[in-house]
Amino acid sequence: MLGRTASNLFWMSRYMERAENVARLTEVGHRMSLTPDVGGGYREDWQSTLTAAGCFDTQGKLGTIPTAAAAQQYLLFDRTNPSSVISCLEAARHNGRSVRTALTRAVWESLNATWIEFGTMSREATGPAQLPGLLDWVRERSSLFRGAVQGSLLRDEGFHFIELGTYVERSDNTARILDSKYSTLLPTTDAAGGERGMHQWETILRSVSAHRSYRYVYKDSYRPANIAEFLILRPEMPRSLRFCHHRIFRSLRRLAEMTDGGSASLALSREIGERLEGSQIADIYRAGLHDFLLDFLRRTAEVADTLATDYHFN
Amino acid sequence: MLKTQAYTSDGAPASFDEMLRPDGTPRPAYAELMKWLGQQSKTSLRQKQQEAEAIFSRLGITFAVYGSAEANEKIIPFDLIPRIISAAEWRFLERGIEQRVRALNAFLYDIYHRQEIVRAGKIPSAMVNQNDAFLPDMMGFDPPANVYAHIIGVDLVRTGDNGFFVLEDNLRTPSGVSYMLENREAMMHLFPELFSAHRVAPVERYPELLRQTLESVAPRHCDGDPTIAVLTPGVFNSAYFEHAFLADQMGVELVQGSDLMVEDGALFMRTIRGKEQLHVIYRRIDDAFLDPLNFRPDSMLGVPGLFGLYRAGKVTIVNAPGTGIADDKAVYAYVPDIVSFYTGEKPILDNVQTFRCSIDDERAYVLDKLDELVVKEVHGSGGYGMLIGPHASKKERSDFAERIKARPANYIAQPTLALSTCPAFCPEGISPRHVDLRPFVLVGDKIRVTPGGLTRVALKKGSLVVNSSQGGGTKDTWVLED
């Protein structure tokens, strides 16, 4: 397999995962803007949605307090925003098209049809009434892509580069969501949280589609330490940092076996995995949640850079 | 119920029609199809048409349209009604094509060695040696199996029952084979009943035959299985879909120049394991871009040192550099002589009658009949530098006459051809439209011709231009088995 092909596969799935995550965050932001706030008005906070999505308004297009319409436009349809859904879908397809030969027809068609249909839907469905439908649709298409990958691809090197793209992006996303709201997750906020705290916690869990599964796992009302543990350390939670890093490690180990290479990225990944497995949530709080998350984001980026070098991406 | 009446009342076609005889009865190969067409409704065909377009666009069977930023990928219009070639017609065409490609490869070998054909006075030396498409770097080099043009698309037109003519030989990097294959897939999906009613020769083995052809011309030193790759200029090339499609179907890598490197006298591609040696390159980039050390120094698409390796026999480039000399428009007029010279036989397939303005008598005739002829610049392509006499104004003709007189060797002229028509599904119903045919030929250890080829159709009423850039579409092409 060409190094360039591996790179395209990795970025193809990263962008598809990112499209899904940005769509989910937009949905949560939209939902918030429909919820009355304690002192009147609504709980609209598009700035925090943009931060959690990693969509920084570098050109100052949105003003200090972005309106719902402007923020949604920027998150979904703005081509100058490299993480907007439209940019992600286009980049995913472009990467896929560059390695058409490494994909099955099912995977390619899922990317291509998504791109074509999103163009049509985005012209028709921009009003608030159509927004939830459009966002659901993006998530469905991402699921279809993942399903096509799982159901039709050979378990060769290419599959593992796709896996790596998915889980690097996902762990990055979960860590960023946690970090954007870390102050509401400190143990001291537990009692003082009140209704507003409750609402913030719900938002965090919804941002990773975990508000239902939380109840299954904890059989308890929302508690910040549980939420942090759920999204950082629980191995059964498919968007937790530990789960994602286990998958990253698994794919890197398999690739190392197949290619007799990749030792640097594998070593970094092993180190992150051991840290996550050996930690209790109390340890993380002791060291500082914010510092832990920043360190984690840095290490994840380092794994991505190192694997690009190990496998001759350029 | 669709009436084929609509077809005939369109005015009895002035050209030879593939389906109908002048008396309105179908030719035998089309009898079943015509019956079937009579049973279809416009609505059901329109539905199938939309279904076909949805399939092509979902698969990404597109070509890029240069210069339009908005939608830079389009699907080529596909016409539902197949073009049918009888078994006997195909046997004739196949023999003619084989003879022609054998002769053209012999010609290439000869002009890059002793140039016997020039010595014999069959073709002027200047026509070969001063031609821009002649590549002196190839002199004296023996490519594996002495094959230069491995993948060839022969453009044929038809003007009568036995009137097939070669309009052009494409010996550089002919495209369109992916449409041939995907058109067939789509038709089998849309109209299975037609395939039970006809014995249609399959085309699906093409990728396998292409691979065998490429393997058969591996460098002589290569002992094990040769490693093959398709070299593409990249995702923005108009034929990128085809490059990816063929690599995929053959199970080989699709590479770009930046993926390749020359080291220690061998060609390598950069893989996730480091470097891997390549033996055969099916290149879909032009000669000029192959190797910046030998050809265009500004080329970013090729590989520095590739041509040197090729000449040293370390890697095979398919098609060979320098094949363009044999499909040059000026040389075209000599192909019948080329066929006789190397095969000792009479050409089975004729050229379209061609007047060479470099020859006094022929030029005089061309200048006299400018209002009837098509005049082409010998190095032009895609319709540039061309005069269509019957459609040109008096002023355009007299301007062109001056250009011919100034540089006679630069022009050839041909009669305006009445291309045959074939039924096509058009907004008004089923109507005759002009078609041509590009069969695909593979030359390696042996010659492999895939039955049929790509039929291009001018979907605009009365138009003779089948190019996709000017409203042309494609059809599935059936060769019936006995």
Image (cartoon, grey):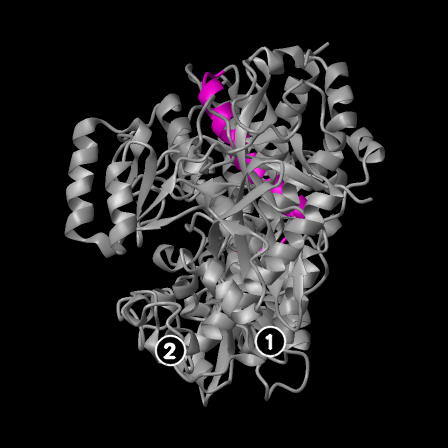
- Lateral position of residue B379 relative to residue B480, left or right: left
Q: Nearer the viewer, residue B392 or A290?
A: B392
Left or right: residue B114 versus residue B144 is left
Residue A246 higher or lower than B377, as above or below: below
Where is the N terminus of chain A found, in terms of image quarters? bottom right
Question: Measured along the vertical axis of the image, is residue B450 above or below residue B72?
Answer: below
Residue at the right extreme of this rendering: B196
Q: Secondary structure at mark 2?
A: helix
Chain name for mark 2: B
Residue range in magenta is: A99-128
- Residue in view at x 22 percent, y 53 percent: B408
Residue bearing mark 2: B119
Q: Nearer the viewer, residue B278 or B26?
A: B26
Residue A239 part of the magenta segment: no
Q: Residues within 10 Å of mark 2 (few under 14, many from 20)?
A: few
Say whether disc 1 or disc 2 marks the residue closer to the N-terminus.
2
The percent position of residue B253, horizontal first and vertical second, equals 58, 65
The quarter of the rendered structure image containing the C terminus of chain A is bottom left
Left or right, residue B387 beside residue B3: left
In the rendering, at what x and y percent does residue B200 appear?
A: 77, 41
Quadrant of residue A256 in the image? bottom right
Indicate the secondary structure of the residue bearing disc 1.
Answer: loop
Q: Say which of A60 and B462 sits in front.
A: B462
Residue B181 appears in view: yes
- Residue A159: x and y in percent read 66, 59
Residue at 56 percent of width and 80 percent of height:
B144
Residue at image mark 1: B217
